[in-house]
Image (tube, coloured by chain):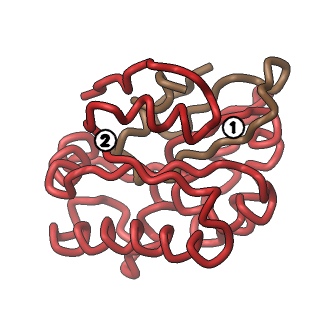
Amino acid sequence: MRYKGIDLESKIRDRETDLEFVAETLGPALDAYDTVTDVPVPVLYRQLFRQYPTAKFILLLRNPFDWLRSVRSLIGERMLWPYERVQYWHYLRQKPMKLSEVDDQQLLRMNALHTAEIIEFFAQVAPQNLGVFELGAENAGRQISSFLGLNSDTLLPIVP
Amino acid sequence: MTTRDGGVVYRPSTESTGMKCFVVSLHRTGTRAMSKFL
């Protein structure tokens, strides 16, 4: 994520497990945009909710085995980037530099834990702020639009 | 505006709808689809 020419990702290097620091560092960029998606946002939901208590949070569910194949295919043997490390190190105690060091069982457990913890968190603090949708469902686009208070029949695109 | 895979942001606040939205699905769980959709 670059903001005003500053490489924010390099600023969080070596602080990947400090979610408060990561959220604070990304703060100017988060302030400047209505919508943010992708790493490291998924594991910053507690900090983001505290900072933006009226924000909407969208959680898409995907078949975990499809997710596992997708992650393995994309990342393969390469080193994890700092933003990716924020997400994976939050759940994987061994703090892998490569995802190939992690077995499938651990990744599937992480996937399940992420979903469970987000739902548990928002169930306690603000259930109305969280929308949970199924990736690939025919009406997902309409449901998400409705959750955001938008009137749209746009389909959720399929991105490989 | 879309950056590389690893932080996708768009709709600057100058065009703001007044609503903040964060996609908290894990990486590779519809994050790119959402960046095109929203």
Q: Which mark is residue A144?
A: none
Location of residue A52 with respect to A160 vertically, above or below: below
Q: Position of residue A143 (x, y in %)?
A: 45, 37
Residue A113 rendering spot, x and y as whole percentages: 37, 74
What amino acid type should be assigned to the residue bearing mark 1? Asp
Q: Amino acid at mark 2?
A: Leu
Chain ID, brown in image: B
The residue depicted at 80 percent of the width and 25 percent of the height is B16
State which quarter of the image contains the N terminus of chain A: top right
Does dot 1 land on a helix, a strand or a loop? strand
Q: Which residue is mark 2?
A: A135
Instruction: Look at the picture and state if A32 lies above or below A84.
Output: above
**Residue at numbered disc 1:** A7
Residue A86 horizontal side relative to residue A36, left or right: left
The quarter of the picture where residue A3 lies is top right
Left or right side of A115 for A37: right
Q: Quadrant of the C terminus of chain A?
A: top left
| Residue A99 visible in the current orientation | yes
Tell me where residue B36 appears, x and y as whole percent.
47, 22
State the hue of chain A: red
